[in-house]
Amino acid sequence: MPALVLLGAQWGDEGKGKATDLLGGSVDYVVRYQGGNNAGHTVVVGDQKYALHLLPSGILSPGCTPVIGNGVVVDPSVLLSELSGLNERGVDTSKLLLSGNAHIITPYNVTVDKVTERFLGKRKIGTTGRGIGPTYADKINRVGIRVQDLYDESILTQKVEAALDVKNQVLTKLYNRRAIAVDQVVEELLGYADQLAPFVADTVLVINKALENDQVVLFEGGQGTLLDIDHGTYPFVTSSNPTAGGACTGAGVGPTKISRVIGILKAYTTRVGAGPFPTELFDADGEALRRIGGERGVTTGRDRRCGWFDAVIARYATRVNGLTDFFLTKLDVLTGWEEIPVCVAYEIDGKRVEELPYSQSDFHHAKPIYETLPGWSEDITKAKSFTDLPKNARDYVKALEEMSGAPISAIGVGPGRDETIQINSFL
């Protein structure tokens, strides 16, 4: 049962799309298991760049079946727009499967997300405003709309009415907004039904049958470990579980079927949105990382906050996900620095701490303790094997591997599909 989970080992934006795409030719199914169009993957194929937000990266690999699992929240307009854009560029999207149990992001979920974030002011979380959090809240409160509800107008109307009974009270009386009409929402959602129908399937059955037939299934997480609702830097997190355990619930497979868990690590650290970030840089080095690395959110368009590599976070990701391998991305961005600091521990209240503190207050006050490694100036983008890298680049990779607690099995040395060094096979 060759089932692999691929996920972000930092705060997201680590380059998961490139890693998924690397495996695409050997994978039969790629499954998104959580999140929504608040995630984004950039995949470069030849001279073509594809920005994917809701679709699994495997949609760019011929012969691979992309699946949107039950744990994903789906904005139908975004999904159909993304499919249309790929079709116009000659990408075959006909094999996509969409779980009938995935929850729908409704227009009122988007409205609630935006007005709530504005209302929070200085206390805002930094959401994308795309309705993801309110949709997951509806799911937990059992007033959510699922894809399958689009095919029963009576049930859909009842569910929208139930959801808006409370939401309209909040919108009108607390936020001074206009009430949302039930009929208008129902009409809009029903308008997506025929367009989505060819893709809707019992994806849990499909995925498990594939594993029983020894097909290779890759479970692709959005965001990253430190944005996990349970294991991330709460409350500055997403509304789902990007960690490895989320693959089981978000796709409907048992944990005994997972064979490998691959964590994607950027050779430095970035994050989008608010929240503590011990190694964040506010100087010329931070600006250089942002500029050279092209650090702008695929989905949000916001500049990413940049900092040096944090080994404490990497060790934490290894632990909570049970990582078997790392894929190190964007090593080429560090070319040109004479010395490269790496955070090996934190100082909290005058004490050295080598593991991620569970206390939000402690993490907020954590100061990075750095070890400095020698840099390199040679162009590494043409390297095809680990031995092709300059000695200092090899030493940097080995140091990160030792600090992080799992082997680095692949290295990204450029944005292109072929600009990757494979050290150990993931399959």
Image: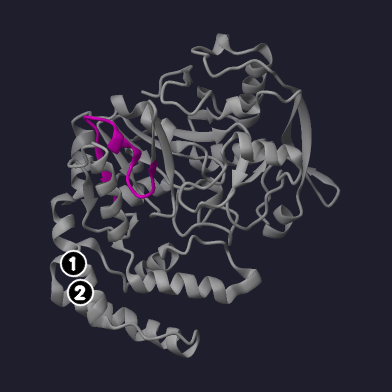
Which residue ends up furthest to the right in the rendered image? 350
Q: Amino acid at mark 1?
A: Gly
Q: Residues within 10 Å of mark 1 (few under 14, many from 20)?
A: few
* Depth order, front residue of 191/392: 191
Residue sitting at 33 percent across and 42 percent down? 56
Estimate the x, y position of residue 418 in percent, counting from the top left.
42, 21
State the quadrant of the C terminus: top left
Q: Which residue is mark 1?
A: 191
342 displayed left or right of 347? left
Position of residue 299 relative to residue 322, above or below, is below
State the quadrant of the N terminus: top left
45 displayed left or right of 158? right
Q: Is there any visible trace of residue 248 in the rendered image?
A: yes
The magenta stretch is: 51-69
Residue sitting at 40 percent across and 54 percent down? 35
> Label 1 near label 2: C-beta < 8 Å?
yes
In the picture, residue 283 is in which quadrant?
top right
Q: Amino acid at mark 2?
A: Glu
Colour setting:
one colour
Q: Residues within 10 Å of mark 2 (few under 14, many from 20)?
A: few
- Secondary structure of the residue carrying tag 2 is helix
* Depth order, front residue of 404/80: 80
Determine which of the numbered discs, if any, sits on residue 73 in the image: none
| Magenta region includes residue 239 | no
Q: Which residue is mark 2?
A: 187
* Depth order, front residue of 417/235: 417
Measure the alpha-carbon separation of dots 2 and 1: 6 Å
Position of residue 207 relative to residue 421, above or below, is below
